[in-house]
Amino acid sequence: MTADYRACADLIRQADGLLVTAGAGIGVDSGLPDFRGRPGFWGVYPALGRARIGFERIANPAAFVAQPRLAWGFYGHRLQLYRQTIPHAGFAILRRIGENLPNGVFVFTSNVDGQFQRAGFADDRLVECHGSIHHLQCLDTCHDGIWPADDLQPLIDEEHCLLTSDLPRCPHCRAIARPNILMFGDQGWLAGRTAAQEERLHHWLQQVERLLVIEVGAGTNIPTVRLLGERSRGRLIRINPGEPQLPPGKGVSIAAGGLAALRAIDACLD
């Protein structure tokens, strides 16, 4: 694969702006769990497995209505996990590559974990197309505002996947608060923050003449991230150990994990 890594380095040298696109796979090297399939999901949340509750059912606004302590047991655990996780070295490689280009770097991710911000990427150069677990909104959408989850310190009974501390509340109407995340069957997600991010991306893309997209860990199950790169006018480097397929002539595909591939590309640049 050495020739492929050298080809990636050549594409980087030709670019004047880098768009990093990322799915859940980029977090695996940081130790974040992979929810692929019910066995994988229930392995991380055995209480939900015992109750036969799949990801689509708990990651759903209806769960906050029917079983709010269970829903917040799941999301509260994830919030704590993401706060404790240190982004792997591949994030720093991507950031360094982008910052060395004339128009810098922008990020488009379906991840809600805030790992790019923790890795030092600028908040105004990032699109979180599914929202962020680090922001909250009213479950009843009594107003269209969202607020940071910084003050939320959930206590979780991990054996039963239940929130044991107070439920977070909307500061206006005192209804239950929920993460500002696009969930399954979601008609109440407040998308204003993400829409503003997408507008900034649109303006940035207009300035870039030689766009390069580096995609890491984006699967085909929900193909939002993959389609963005494939439909862009730039060249595309796709890094994915299981689904590296790429349209002919679009760029370079790398069948490897994110961290290993990024380190190999970085070595070719050096």
Image (cartoon, helix red, strand yellow):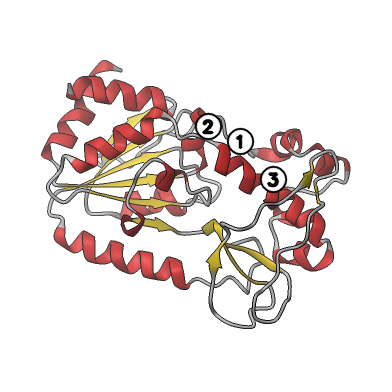
Q: Secondary structure at mark 3?
A: helix
Q: Position of residue 154 (x, y in %)?
A: 71, 51
- Which residue lies most toward the front here? 151
Is residue 19 shown left or right of residue 186?
A: left
> Could you say which quadrant of the image residue 47 lies in?
top right
Report helix, strand or loop for mark 1.
Answer: loop
Q: Earlier in the sequence, mark 3 or mark 2?
A: 2
Q: Which residue carries the number 1 mark? A: 34
User: Depth-wise, is mark 3 or mark 2 nearer the camera?
Assistant: 3
Please state which amino acid type lies under the numbered disc 3. His
Residue at mark 2: 28
Identity, as a three-letter code, of the amino acid under mark 2: Val
Q: CA distance from mark 1 to mark 2?
A: 7 Å
- For residue 68, the mark is none
Q: Callout 3: 10 Å neighbours few (<14), some, many (20+)?
A: many
- Identify the residue under disc 3: 77
